[in-house]
Image (tube, rainbow, N blue to C red):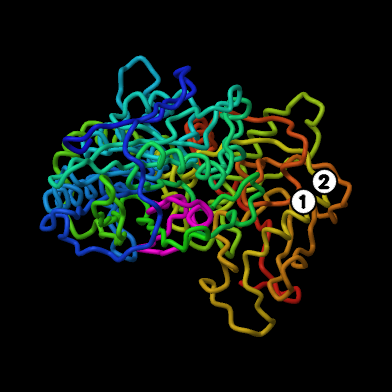
């Protein structure tokens, strides 16, 4: 943590105590004022400049490394990733601004996303007997984080692993709207509060309120149902911000794992707004700045006017995976024996402008090497190469492979039971257009690259009518293209911003997607075993838990009967299948289940 400060942390329900109160001077009123010069705190006896640095959506990235390509990370925009890069920027800013006046916070999604994070959650879990410390805890402790909000992906591996991670962190994990289901009290510290010493007089009292995403209740229902509740961000901020001001906070910053759009992504049916950061700024008085997360967008600075006070609240979001570092510059002046905020500016720094911090890469070198060895284990062979490059507009064997394994797994699970004779279908999406299986030797990283999320598998009982509705919803993904118009595959997809992972294809039936028709009227020739699929036909759909829980707002499936569910990640199921069979042969499972058409003619 930053130097020479006193810290207060809200206690949690798990301690059996209430939230700790930190006494202090009354807070300054939330009134607009002009921004002070950047060096005012160093040259004016009644002014002070505070810097708050922020990251979000690190998703297990420490090194500038891609475990799926087994090489340094690269993308078309020249971005770098990882906490080792962020650490270099943080050290530079602490040296420039002064460590005593520089805080560092995070807005969540920390312990899921790379094979490094996965290894220490599932292969050598930190909940085991080995005494392993999570690499993200090691790295964030070394960088010197002061506080971090919880993201929704923190719950992917279950509450016990999250609690183990929490114990290993030298900083608090904050979530004012993660409540214990039995007591309805905070299950994690709601806030972190500190005193920043100044040369001009009294300490500046800074409070960071942590808010997480209400979507956890749906997306990780298996882990949290009956254990935790996740009320809305606005209502919880309205509860806590006045209390922080009454505790004497001169500066109130919110770290929110929630985007700015005011909507829920792609129509997800959530009990509360998923991307609520702007609503918090507009509706809750007393906030100076919000570090935004979750949406994987880059926002250098956005100013939102609070409806009650007319005061501007500054929002900023650094790009995911440690690609950017947010810098809040907060100008304060002496006021009635304390301090008031005169203005806030924010900016983002690009991590590709600096080298990795050797302190961090050296600290995690052994863990990194262990994971590189793990993902490069050969587990089988492939008779031919397969690629996802065209999966967004063409039925390709690599997606059929995922669906084939899922369908086989469900058939085996239902064998001998009431539903054993029903046709088994499977849904899958293209998570990465760069995913590929090489001809010859196949490694864990090759297979894991097909399924980058920690989804698990379920079997749901659906009807023919529900399947048709599901496919029509999925087909919104394509831009309507009239017969005879030229077709550019790259411009054909992602209509209305729908991401690749929200375009599902279904294996086990055949159908056409007519892109000349309006969304909602595109599915034709839907057949099972060569015969038209009846609306009242009963089918088993192998589906991931995200989709089955309502993720993406696909119709019908969340309300259907669950016939079976697996606790193992689909990624591990794929790896185990290759290890068991020893060979991936597309001739066994590849076929033409679906195609794009216009007026009955294939597009490709």
Q: Nearer the viewer, residue 66 or 399?
A: 66
Say which residue label 2 marks: 463
Q: Is residue 257 above or below residue 329?
A: above
Using a 10 Å C-alpha cutoff, classify the residue at mark 2 as few (fewer than 14 neighbours), some (14 to 19) or many (20 or more): many
The magenta segment = 277-304
Q: Quadrant of residue 183?
A: top right
- At 46% from the left and 50% from the top, the residue drawn is 294
Q: Is residue 43 above or below residue 151?
A: below
- At 35% from the left and 56% from the top, the residue drawn is 318
Give the tally of numbered discs. Answer: 2
Q: Is residue 443 above or below residue 301?
A: above
Q: Nearer the viewer, residue 151 or 30?
A: 30
Do we see residue 441 in this rendering? no
Q: Nearer the viewer, residue 226 or 588?
A: 226
Say which residue label 1 marks: 467
Left or right of 410: which side holds 10?
A: left
Q: Which mark is residue 528?
A: none
Residue 209 horizontal/vertical position (percent): 41, 41
Residue 292 horizontal/vertical position (percent): 42, 52
> Which part of the image, by quadrant, shows the N terminus?
top left
Q: Are marks 1 and 2 in contact (CB under 8 Å)?
A: yes
Using a 10 Å C-alpha cutoff, classify the residue at mark 1 as few (fewer than 14 neighbours), some (14 to 19) or many (20 or more): many
Residue 375 horizontal/vertical position (percent): 35, 37
């Amino acid at each position: 943590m930053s130097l020479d400060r006193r810290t207060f942390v809200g206690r949690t329900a798990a301690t059996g105590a209430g939230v700790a109160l930190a006494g202090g001077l009354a807070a300054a009123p939330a009134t607009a004022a002009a921004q002070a010069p950047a060096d005012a705190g160093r040259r004016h006896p009644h002014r002070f400049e505070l810097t708050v640095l922020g990251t979000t959506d690190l998703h297990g990235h420490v090194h500038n490394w891609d475990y799926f390509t087994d090489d340094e990370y690269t993308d078309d925009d020249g971005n770098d990733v990882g906490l080792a890069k962020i650490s270099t920027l943080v050290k530079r800013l602490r040296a420039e601004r002064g460590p005593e006046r520089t805080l560092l916070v995070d807005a969540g999604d920390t312990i899921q996303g790379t094979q490094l994070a996965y290894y220490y959650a599932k292969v050598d879990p930190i909940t085991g007997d080995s005494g392993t410390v999570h690499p993200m805890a090691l790295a964030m402790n070394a960088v010197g984080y002061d506080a971090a909000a919880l993201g929704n992906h923190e719950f992917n591996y279950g509450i016990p692993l999250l609690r183990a991670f929490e114990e290993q962190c030298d900083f608090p994990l904050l979530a004012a709207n993660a409540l214990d289901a039995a007591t309805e009290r905070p299950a994690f510290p709601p806030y972190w509060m500190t005193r920043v010493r100044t040369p001009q007089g009294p300490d500046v009292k800074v409070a960071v309120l942590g808010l997480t995403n209400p979507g956890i209740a749906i997306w990780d229902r298996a882990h949290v149902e009956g254990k935790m509740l996740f009320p809305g961000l606005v209502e919880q901020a309205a509860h806590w911000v006045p209390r922080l001001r009454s505790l004497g906070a001169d500066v109130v910053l919110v770290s929110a794992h929630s985007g700015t759009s005011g909507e829920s992504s792609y129509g997800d049916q959530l009990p509360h707004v998923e991307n609520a950061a702007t609503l918090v700024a507009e509706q809750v008085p007393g906030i100076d700045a919000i570090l935004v997360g979750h949406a994987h967008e880059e926002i250098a600075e956005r100013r939102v006017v609070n409806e009650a006070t007319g005061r501007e609240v500054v929002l900023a979001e650094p790009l995911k995976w440690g690609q950017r570092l947010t810098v809040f510059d907060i100008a304060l002046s002496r006021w009635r024996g304390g301090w008031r905020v005169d203005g806030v500016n924010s900016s983002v720094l690009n991590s590709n402008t600096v080298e990795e911090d050797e302190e961090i890469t050296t600290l995690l070198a052994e863990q990194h090497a262990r994971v590189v060895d793990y993902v490069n284990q050969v587990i089988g062979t492939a008779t031919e190469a397969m690629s996802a490059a065209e999966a967004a507009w063409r039925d390709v064997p690599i997606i059929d492979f995922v669906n084939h394994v899922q369908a086989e797994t469900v058939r085996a699970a239902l064998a001998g039971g009431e539903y054993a004779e029903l046709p088994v279908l499977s849904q899958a999406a293209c998570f990465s257009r760069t995913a590929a299986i090489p001809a010859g030797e196949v490694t864990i990283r090759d297979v894991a690259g097909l399924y980058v999320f920690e989804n698990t598998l379920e079997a749901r009982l659906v009807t023919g009518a529900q399947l048709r509705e599901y496919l029509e919803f999925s087909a919104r993904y394509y831009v309507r293209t009239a017969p005879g118009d030229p077709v550019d595959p790259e411009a054909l997809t992602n209509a209305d911003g729908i991401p690749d992972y929200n375009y599902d294809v279904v294996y086990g039936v055949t159908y056409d997607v007519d892109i000349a028709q309006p969304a909602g009227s595109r599915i034709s020739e839907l057949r099972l075993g060569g015969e038209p699929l009846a609306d009242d036909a009963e089918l088993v759909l192998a589906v991931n838990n995200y989709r089955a829980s309502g993720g993406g707002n696909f119709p019908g499936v969340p309300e259907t009967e669950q016939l079976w569910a697996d606790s193992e990640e689909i990624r591990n199921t794929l790896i185990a299948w290759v290890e068991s069979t020893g060979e991936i042969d597309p001739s066994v499972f590849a076929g033409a289940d679906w195609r794009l058409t216009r007026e009955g003619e294939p597009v490709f």
